[in-house]
Image: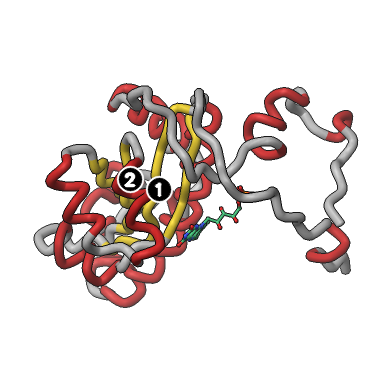
Amino acid sequence: MTETLEASSLAIDDATADRLFRTARTVTTFAESEVTDEQLAAVYDLIKWGPTMMNTSPLRVLVVRTPEARQRLVANAPEGNQERIAKAPVTLVLASDPDFHERLDVLVPHIPGAREMFAGDAEARAEAARTSALLQAGYLIVGLRAAGLAAGPMHGNYDGIDAEFFAENGWKSFLVVNVSSADGADTTRPRAPRLNFDDVAQVV
Ligand SMILES: Cc1cc2nc3c(=O)[nH]c(=O)nc-3n(C[C@H](O)[C@H](O)[C@H](O)COP(=O)(O)O)c2cc1C
């Protein structure tokens, strides 16, 4: 079912395409070596350039490192995901910030009044925040791979996570991502096929 596009159709070399997508896997077993805050900051510094609605940039990231914080996260994860979260070198909780409008004077200087436009509509803000933050999560997973790291996205119990970690800032979690240095990081799952362009696209 899975076909691979001719390399000549891409603007990146094969090794890069492999690293970012073709041979990159969702990590389920982890390397021992450390993933530093500097590496994570470098990844964010790259993926922050990915597009978001009106440049709202609503993704927020909680970096979970300490044993105490990790236990609080494990307690708010489905049972089947708990062991992997417990063993990962570092785990990110990805969230959207419904109060992203507070930053719009800086982020959207080209649209005067953007902040005020969103200020009165909490429901629209929550939806806009989630949509663009989900996109940014995709950029982040690819960015981790670009930095030579491996990502293991998985679900958490988000209401519990929000109550445990985000009661004060109001962030809304939507994904948990275990991160490992790729060296030694691996998966126990066989690679599953993907749909092809013809399966998913309609051309009109
Ligand atoms: C939004 C999302 C939620 C996921 N939730 C879980 C999960 O709760 N538990 C789990 O083991 N894997 C989870 N995964 C991992 C996927 O099953 C995995 O990325 C997919 O099967 C592709 O695997 P591959 O990259 O190794 O080909 C999730 C992935 C995404 C993107």
Q: Is residue 46 left or right of residue 122?
A: right
As shown in the figure, which amino acid type bears the numbered disc 1?
Val
Identified at 22% across, 69% down, the residue is 160
Is 199 left, or right, of 70 in this rendering?
A: right
Q: Earlier in the sequence, mark 2 or mark 1?
A: 2
> How busy is the neighbourhood of tag 2: few (under 14 within 10 Å), some, or many (20 plus)?
many
Asked if residue 165 lies left or right of residue 111, the reply is: left
Quote the CA–CA distance across marks 2 and 1. Answer: 5 Å
Residue 159, position as x, y percentages in the image: 25, 71
Q: In the image, is residue 125 above or below residue 147? A: below
Residue labelled with disc 2? 92
Identify which residue, 195 or 128, lies in the foreground: 195
Q: Which sits in the foreground, 33 or 137?
A: 33
Callout 1 crowding tier (Cα within 10 Å): few <14, some 14–19, many ≥20:
many
Question: What colour scheme was applied to this rendering of the protein?
Answer: secondary structure
Identity, as a three-letter code, of the amino acid under mark 2: Leu
Q: Residue at x 54, y 32 (%)?
A: 145
183 up-or-down from 53: above or below: above
Q: Position of residue 33 (x, y in %)?
A: 37, 23
Residue depicted at x 36% and y 47%: 108
Q: Secondary structure at mark 1?
A: strand
Looking at the rendered structure, the secondary structure element under dot 2 is strand
For label 1, the residue is: 177
Q: How many marks?
A: 2
Provide residue 28's location: percent of width, then percent of height: 49, 45
Give coordinates of residue 51: x percent, y percent: 51, 46
Q: Which mark is residue 94?
A: none
- Front residue (pair 41, 25): 25
Circles 2, 1 touching at the beta carbon (< 8 Å): yes
